[in-house]
Image: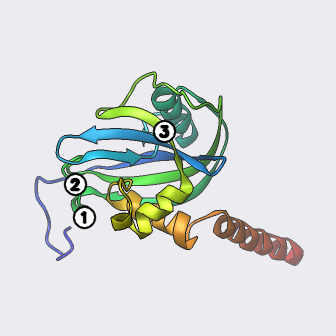
Amino acid sequence: MGPDGSRKEGLAMQIRNAVRALIIHDDKLLSIKKERANVGIYYALPGGAQELDETLEQALVRECREELGVEITDSHLLCIREYISNNHEYSFIMKKVHAIDFMFLCKIDPIADDLRSVRADIGQIGIEWLPIPHIRESLLQPDKLERPLKFPGRLHEFYYDFFVTGKVGLLQSESYLHTAASRSDNNNRGN
């Protein structure tokens, strides 16, 4: 059903799972550099759709191997976000997409400046380590920068929450884990 309660016949949109890798080293974020004629240069997180019979972790490893040419050495789920392309300014890039993005904080090997894709995505023109202070400036004061960084729709919001306000992050994940552990301890004491 649509938001107004009506059924949308013949317009079934499948919801897909996708993984995204947040890789931070030396105050820099590893990013996929992309270019489209109607957007210009913009940056995205490495990752992509989960394939049939593939776990989220396997999808994460495969996507990072293909797009970055690296191996994931450690990862944990940071957060989950929903992406509906029609709700964002760059919806023409990925039309009619409804995805559940699983955002992982990752460590990789090798850590290098000259990474190369094994199988680049459409529009991918490079891989760059973006300085986190430049990301923050691009989010907070893009008009004051000669070349502010561009991030598509929902990723822009995620970066703002992660790098500027701290609404998304390890502290919240640890807090959740602590709460869950406390509940488990309390339940065990009752037995």
Residue 49 visible: no
- The structure residue drawn at horizontal position 21% and vertical position 60%, both measured from the top left corner, is 86
Mark whose residue sits in front, 2 or 3: 3
Percent across and percent down for residue 75 are 65, 45
Mark whose residue sits in front, 1 or 3: 3
- The structure residue drawn at horizontal position 54% and vertical position 27%, both measured from the top left corner, is 114
SS class, disc 2: loop
Cα separation, mark 2 vs mark 3, equals 24 Å
Residue furthest top in the image: 118
Percent across and percent down for residue 21 are 53, 45
Under mark 2, the amino acid is Ser
151 in relation to 38, above or below: below
- The structure residue drawn at horizontal position 50% and vertical position 36%, both measured from the top left corner, is 59
SS class, disc 3: strand
Percent across and percent down for residue 50 are 43, 39
Residue that badge 2 annotates = 91
Residue furthest left in the image: 9
Q: State the mark number for residue 128.
A: 3
Answer yes or no: do the residues labelled 2 and 1 have beta carbons within 8 Å? Answer: yes
Residue closer to the observer: 6 or 25: 25
- The structure residue drawn at horizontal position 32% and vertical position 60%, both measured from the top left corner, is 153
For the image shown, how many numbered marks are present on the structure? 3
Residue that badge 1 annotates = 87
